[in-house]
Image: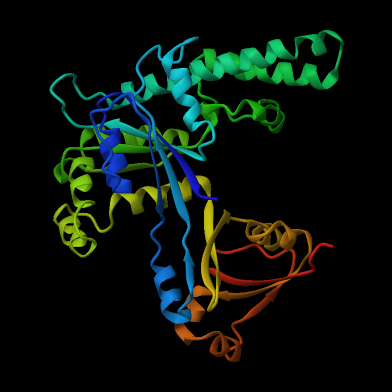
Amino acid sequence: MPLRCGLIGRPQCGKTTVFNAITSAHASMFDAAETHRATVAIPDPRVQELVNLYRPAKVSPSCLDLVDIPGLEEGATSEGGRGSKLLTHIKESDVLIHVVRCFENGHAAVDAIHDVEIIDLELMSADSQTLERKIERIAKRVKSGDKDAVRESEDCQRVLNRLHEGLPARRQNLSESEKASVFECTLMSLKPVLYVANVDGPESLASDSVEALTAYGEREGSETVAVCGRDEADISELPEEDRQAFLEELGLHEPSVERIIHAAYRELGLVDFFTAGEKEVHVWTCKAGSTAPAAAGKIHTDMERGFIRMEVIAYDDLMEHGSEDAVAKAGKQRLEGKEYLIRDGDIVVVRFSPSR
């Protein structure tokens, strides 16, 4: 399943420009009422090395699913507001990519933190409505003395009270009970956030606005990536072989899509592992710290249910020795059981008992 990212921000923050820089989708920046979607392969140089080694008939990279919704203004998520409908597009996002204007636009002064807080207020407004509806929905069960309903209602009310105090759910250090009680609500202010500081040129990559946004993100444990959205959108339209030279002129070693994806992986604590052979090289993504059976379940649920063992080769060992046979002769191929924690870059074969 692709990594799902929701692109949010205020009007005129350059959000669609950043969307184009990431996806090369050439989405129009003049249809502000429209939602844009694109799916792109996640760049990983290891995939090409595995392709060179195995010469597979098929390659299945990990993918990024990106949805860009129109900019949100104050009051957009009030009852019946247009923003409430727009936000449904990102309810299922794994991470929110919050694009923040850090450039002059001739209309309003740059105030990155104010812009972030406006969006947070809209997310919290929508979440408040969701929680209020749940509390109302279980009120009869609460009155009847249902202990689970009482606990859920109290948990939801505590989260709601803190939202009213201006504290997004992701900053509330929710207890396990509170997390369970609000789980079905899919709170948007609980989702991990990656801030993208959109600047007007390489000379602004370390501007006061970027530094302020970076410090703001650090206080809540969120990462900030500075991008030259307009320049990188232009570069994304060039032939691939010409892009690196232009990026280096901007003082960048990798395009925004790679920097944003790497940051999103860190934000979500994700790792990639591989299955590889003549038929297919396939990238799989799971949470860091996943056990071997849980990782195998990403390939097929039967593999998790009937897991026996996992044959593992580290990517670096395979590249060093040049083949699976050479890795095995060097004693670097491992047999791992149910307690093994998957590592980034593992190349695996799963042995399992098929369900009947």
- Can residue 344 be spotted in the picture? no
Total marks shown come to: 0
- The answer to whether 353 appears left or right of 97 in the picture is right
Q: Residue at x 16, y 26 (%)?
A: 105
Identify the residue at the far front of this view: 57
> Horizontal placement of 277 versus 82: left or right?
right
In the foreground, 38 or 104: 38
Colour mode of the rendering: rainbow
In this view of the protein, which residue sits in the foreground, 192 or 298? 298
Horizontally, residue 278 falls left or right of residue 67, namely: right
166 up-or-down from 349: above or below: above
Position of 139 relative to 227 (above/below): above
Q: Position of residue 230 (x, y in %)?
A: 19, 41
Q: Residue at x 61, y 20 (%)?
A: 159
In the rendered image, the quadrant that contains the C terminus is: bottom right
Q: Is residue 148 visible?
A: yes
Residue 173 point in image, percent of width and height: 59, 30
Above or below for 59 versus 18: below
Residue at the extreme right of the image, as rendered: 145
Q: Residue at x 54, y 75 (%)?
A: 279
Residue 74's x, y, as percent?
A: 37, 14
The image position of residue 147, as x and y in percent, is: 84, 19
User: Residue 10 sits in which quadrant?
Assistant: top left
